[in-house]
Image (cartoon, rainbow, N blue to C red):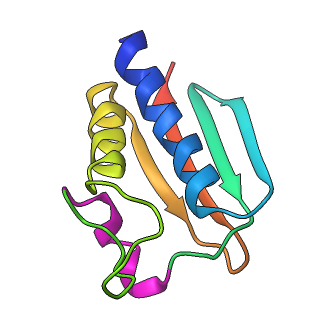
């Protein structure tokens, strides 16, 4: 595992939860069979259904009219996805009606 890039990928998810999420963040690390699962959840507004597939695209930011309360370039989730894939893993936005939940799954 590349500790530098993997730490940046996890930090990006935590940073997004802090910036865009609510006031509660949960981080879980579990071993499930031959996989490591890292789940980062927040109780902020869920990501709208029509935006879920796009959020991992390079330079994509969820539209908020002409202004964003938080500045960014739209590369954080793209980068996180690429790092997970480079480690033979994947990242998912889990469907949930109340929370935003990202899960990284990596083979052990």
Foreground of the two, 63 or 4? 63
Q: Which residue is drawn at 46% across and 40% down?
A: 12
At horizontal 65% and vertical 62% (from top left) the residue drawn is: 21
Q: Is residue 58 left or right of residue 92?
A: left
Number of marks in the image? 0
Q: Is residue 45 visible?
A: yes
Residue drawn at x 31%, y 31% as measured from the top left: 83
| Quadrant assignment for the N terminus | top left
Q: Is residue 1 visible?
A: no
Q: In which quarter of the image is residue 42?
A: bottom right
Q: Is the residue 52 above or below the residue 81 in the image?
A: below
5 relative to 22, above or below: above
Q: Which residue is drawn at 31% across and 68% down?
A: 61
Instruction: Return the residue found at the far right.
Output: 24
Q: Is residue 57 magenta?
A: yes
Magenta segment boundaries in residue numbering: 48-58
Q: Nearer the viewer, residue 70 or 82?
A: 70
Q: Where is residue 23 in the image (x, y as percent from the top left)?
A: 79, 59
Horizontal side of residue 39 vs 2, given as left or right: right
Position of residue 50 measured from the top left corner of the image (x, y, whole percent): 38, 86
Q: Position of residue 36 (x, y in %)?
A: 59, 28
Residue in front for this viewpoint, 40 or 45: 45
Relative vertical location of residue 15 with respect to residue 61 in this rendering, above or below: above
Q: Which residue extends farthest left?
A: 58
On screen, residue 34 above or below 3: below
Instruction: Residue 90: give x, y in percent of width and height.
Output: 39, 43
């Amino acid at each position: 595992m590349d500790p530098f890039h993997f730490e940046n990928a996890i930090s990006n998810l935590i940073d997004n939860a802090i910036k865009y999420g609510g006031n509660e963040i949960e981080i879980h690390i579990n071993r499930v069979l031959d996989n490591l699962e890292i789940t980062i959840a927040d109780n902020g507004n869920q990501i709208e259904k029509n935006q879920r597939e796009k959020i991992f695209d390079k330079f994509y930011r969820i539209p908020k009219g002409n202004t964003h309360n938080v500045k960014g370039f739209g590369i954080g989730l793209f980068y996180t996805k690429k790092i997970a894939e480079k480690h033979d893993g994947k990242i998912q936005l889990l469907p949930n009606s109340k929370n935003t939940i990202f899960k990284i799954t990596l083979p052990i």
